[in-house]
Image (spheres, grey):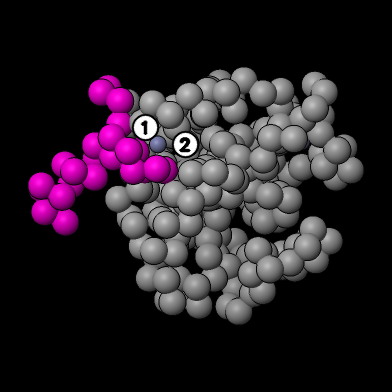
Amino acid sequence: MNSCMKFLFSTLCPFCEKPVTPGDFLCESCRKKLTSYQKLPKCPLCGRTVVTTGICNVCEENSPKFDLAISCQGYHDVFKDGLLAYKFRREFYRAKGFSRLMTETFRKLGVCADCITAVPSDPFTVSKRGYNSSLELAFPMKKLLKLPFYPTLLRKKWFVKRQATLNRKERLENVKGNFCFSKRFSKRIAGKRILLVDDVMTTGATVNECCKLLKKNGAKEVYVVTLLGNNPN
Ligand SMILES: [Zn+2]
Ligand SMILES: [Zn+2]
């Protein structure tokens, strides 16, 4: 991308492609919608929007393996369209704005992490798509948060059924044993607080499976930040 194109894209909202507000990396309309979403009551553990305050049904049923999770917005509207364009139409320029938003959202949790990693895609998806969408989102976050980045901490096995094609029960079953931990990182993560990045959290089955592995291998705490999460009730 030449410098003129870079300038052009950096002035467009990563979600809806309208011009950004000066001093912000989002347009006025998306910023307003984000502010309203952030004000909604949320589950204190997983960040899902809830009707009444307190722990949500999903966390009540199965306590999550992560310590805290948060999403920047629901999976709907221009937010969903923007993410899909990034994931499936290779519109990479959107990643920078998404990462800035995820960094901003993570900072609001009021916790500190020691290192950062991302939920991996399986090698088949990466070779077909040409990149791992979550890793590309985590990469600028490492710079913004000044944290060590371990992109290969977790690996996903080959030919795993895509979560998006399954219902909640099938998703929980499907993710079991899908990921591996790279043992050579054991010492580096022992007793550490890890920030795990993913693009979307729906049932939480994938991030839970990753967190389980990280904790089993010595991580002290795991925080999760995703770009999009559940829709407001
Ligand atoms: Zn926008
Ligand atoms: Zn919850």
Q: Residue at x 78, y 63 (%)?
A: 167
**Element at label 2:** helix
- Seen from the viewer's position, the closer of residues 146 and 183 is 146
**Element at label 1:** loop
Residue matched to label 1: 26
- For the stretch drawn in magenta, what is the main secondary structure? loop
Residue 106: assigned label:
none
Q: Is ligand 1 closer than 8 angstroms to the Cβ of mark 2?
A: no
Q: Residue at x 59, y 28 (%)?
A: 37
Q: Residue at x 80, y 21 (%)?
A: 53
Please, what is the three-letter code of the amino acid marked with disc 1? Leu
Range of residues picked out in magenta = 1-23
Q: Is ligand 1 closer than 8 angstroms to the Cβ of mark 1?
A: yes
Residue 162 part of the magenta segment: no
Q: Residue at x 30, y 31 (%)?
A: 20
* Spot occupied by residue 101 in the image (x, y as percentages of width and height): 43, 34
Q: Tell me the mark number nearer the camera, choosing from 2 and 1.
A: 1
Instruction: Name above or below for residue 142 compared with residue 178.
Output: above
Q: Quadrant of residue 90?
A: bottom left
* Spot occupied by residue 198 in the image (x, y as percentages of width and height): 54, 49
